[in-house]
Image: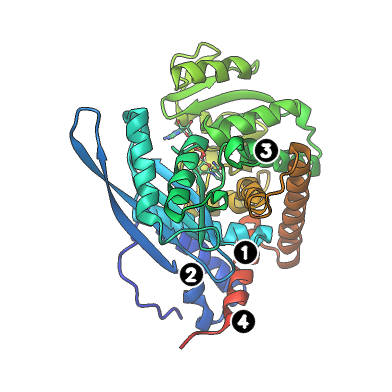
Amino acid sequence: MSKAIVSSLYDSDVFKMACRQFDQAADAINLPDAIRDRTKYPRRCLAVSIPVRRIDGSVTVFEGYRVQHNISTGPSKGGIRFHQDVTLGEVAALAMWMSWKCSLAGLPYGGAKGGVIVNPSKLSESELEHLSRRYMQEMVNFLGPQTDVPAPDVGTNEKIMGWMMDTYSTHVGYLSPAVVTGKPIALGGSQGRREATGAGVAYLTKKYLEDMKLPVNKATAVIQGFGNVGSETAIALSNYGAKIIAISDYTGGIYNPKGINLKKALEYVKYAKVLKDFDGGEPISNEALLELKCTALIPAALERVITDKNAGKLKCRVLAEGANGPTTNAADRILEQREEIELIPDVLCNSGGVIVSYFEWLQNLSSFYWTRDEVLTKLYGMLDKAKDSVDAQKRKFKFNRRLAALTLGIARVAEAKASRGLFP
Ligand code: NAD
């Protein structure tokens, strides 16, 4: 039995969801008590106040977090989210999933995540820069190429990573590109990093469709979220010949059974920032979009959108989790009964992002840069390996695919912790 004495610090639906997933996996592999809670709970966290001078001269204080879930297997690694609904519990859950993801992919990292409670679209460019730099400044003694390496997540991008890298480098007194990944190429970013997560989601979707004898060039895809992951998944799937029939962002969705013109959608979003009023199809709500008949459904926005209310109504053959934590525990139980749907769990499905972040970090540390082809070839090789190991685990123990992926990821972290021993 679990003997942890813990406060309500991380209490939230999404942290509870990540803990339930952990408990189920830990039970399935009989993880010994002595190691269980050490593996489960975040190692440490930092909460900071970030004062930002606004363009009208006033000052707004934002709250930011960084949770380092596991630092036993290498520096911790994970994105920074700028979103108005960020909570410490959400950041902790995302950090936990990063631990299992890095471990499953065989990366020499622990998991971490960061966040700031802010709607970045409400800030001017200079306010956003001030916020990003001050967040990094507050974290400077907590992060570093051998300590904890951030990357982009929802609401952050290459430009923000560049500002953060510059702030850290100014502090230490020399260029330190390996402190952050997902940077602009000019600052030591990797070829292929921008598209890595989406390219990986599309690659694994194609692979699973092949396993099911469904040709990708006859497939239809529905994608929720049209930011980095959603748009890059759409581009890569469409390059494989799939038809993208619906896309969405926080303003709603667009449905076109004949196929969305992605080039036009991307141009529209570049200019209008959102998909609202894009005339490439019929408007559709984010809820209705998830229930569209399609070959592949790809949630690529926020957590907990596939619930016990809609899991029974999904009409896809593959559910590819581009987002982290899109499926609740209750929805998982329903999907387990729906054998016609193949689930590609988040810790496998979207791991292309952190894999190419690892490549970026390696290139920065060695100052030796790879071509895009080299990056993508190595990425697909690592995804194949992770996919094969998950499917072998699934077959061997008759687990569902999420349990197979989580048990592999968790067991490796637990084994490393047990081998290191417990410092008195
Ligand atoms: P992003 O900020 O680039 O894009 C997020 C998209 O989701 C935007 O189009 C936004 O409008 C949309 N969105 C926000 N709220 C929504 C809502 N309620 N309904 C529908 N759409 C909504 O973020 P991203 O980097 O693409 O991240 C998306 C997901 O992928 C997150 O779960 C993130 O943790 C995960 N992820 C990202 C990466 C990465 O490399 N960026 C890697 C792995 C996983």
Callout 4 secondary element: helix
- Residue 284 x %, y %: 47, 22
Quadrant of the image occupied by residue 410:
bottom right
- Residue 328 x %, y %: 48, 51
Residue located 51% across and 72% down the image: 39
| Marked residue nearer the N-terminal end (2 or 3) | 2
Local crowd size for mark 1, using a 10 Å CA cut-off: few (<14), some (14–19), many (≥20): many
Give the residue furthest to the front. 173
Disc nearest the viewer among 1 and 3:
3
Local crowd size for mark 2, using a 10 Å CA cut-off: few (<14), some (14–19), many (≥20): many
Q: Is residue 242 visible?
A: no
Give the residue furthest to the bottom. 424
Q: CA distance from mark 2 to mark 1?
A: 12 Å
Kind of residue at badge 2: Lys
Q: CA distance from mark 3 to mark 4?
A: 35 Å
Q: Nearer the viewer, residue 281 or 160?
A: 160
Q: Is residue 374 above or below residue 252?
A: below
Quadrant for the C terminus in the image: bottom left
Residues tagged 4 and 1 counted as in contact (Cβ below 8 A): no
Kind of residue at badge 4: Ser
Q: Is residue 140 above or below residue 227?
A: below
**Residue marked by disc 4:** 419
Q: CA distance from mark 2 to mark 4?
A: 16 Å
| Marked residue nearer the N-terminal end (2 or 1) | 2
Callout 3 secondary element: loop
Kind of residue at badge 3: Gly
